[in-house]
Amino acid sequence: MKILIINGPNLNMLGAREKEIYGEQTLADMNAEIAAFAKENGMDTVFFQSNIEGEICGAVHGVKSVYGADGIVINAGAYTHYSHAIGDALGCVKVPKAEVHISNVHAREDFRHVSVLADNCNGVICGFGADSYKLACLAVKSVMERAAK
Ligand code: DQA
């Protein structure tokens, strides 16, 4: 079981960017922590990050064909709030999908309360830092296991 973890714009700046919101960890460190957690829980992971909308759509389309993955965990950053292109891309692929956020977007500015991706995902987890991704991996795995029964 393999999960594709997609990070969108500005998440490559973790560790340098607004540390009071996003913490001290770099994306590389966070990904290593998520990969180790996933492995302990019976999942392989593959990571993709881009600041470019079309590249994120391409990664979503390639979940099976390029990445050989069975599910998606996506933090599309600010694209979450307005990219119908990424929302439609998620609608194109029939694998379990979770939207995640490091911060609690609902406790922040109004524009962050809206997601145009969520309706094409199985669910949304936000506000738990790196643990949002770990919880999302468990959730995606659970959807896969239920579907296999
Ligand atoms: C974010 C929340 C978004 O509103 C923001 O634009 C980000 C990060 C998060 O992980 O908390 O870039 O997705």
Image: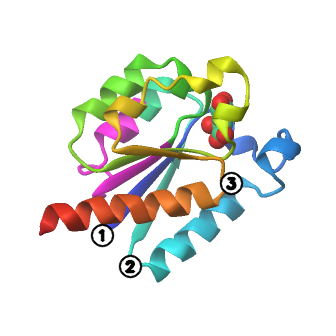
Can you identify the residue that label 1 sits on? Answer: 1
Residue displayed at 85% across by 39% down: 18
Which residue corresponds to the image point at 41% horizontal and 33% vertical from the top-left?
A: 118
The image position of residue 123, as x and y in percent, is: 40, 44
Whether label 1 touches label 2, CB < 8 Å: yes
Judge the density around disc 1: few (<14), some (14-19), many (≥20) Cα neighbours within 10 Å: some
Q: Is residue 120 above or below residue 138?
A: above
| Mark-to-mark CA distance, 2 and 3 | 22 Å
Q: Earlier in the sequence, mark 1 or mark 2?
A: 1
Q: Quadrant of ligand 1?
A: top right
The residue at which mark 3 appears reads as: 129
**What separation in Å lies between label 1 and label 2 (alpha carbons)?**
7 Å
Asked whether, in this view, residue 66 is left or right of residue 135, the answer is left
Q: Is mark 2 within 8 Å of ligand 1?
A: no
* Nearest to the observer: residue 44 or residue 75: 75
> Which residue matches tag 2?
42
Expressed as whole percent of the image width and height from the top left, the position of residue 103 reads 69, 43
Question: Where residue 55 sits: x, y (%)?
Answer: 45, 31
Q: Is residue 66 magenta?
A: yes
Quarter of the view holding residue 69: bottom left
Is 1 positioned to the left or the right of 109 in the image? left
Q: Earlier in the sequence, mark 1 or mark 3?
A: 1
Q: Which residues are magenta?
A: 57-74
Label 1: element kind = loop
Amino acid tagged 2? Gly
Q: Viewer-nearest of labels 1 and 3?
A: 3
The question of residue 21 being in magenta is answered with: no
Q: Residue at x 35, y 39 (%)?
A: 121
Q: Amino acid at mark 3?
A: Gly
In the rendered structure, which amino acid carries the disc numbered 1? Met
Indicate whether 28 appears above or below 40.
above
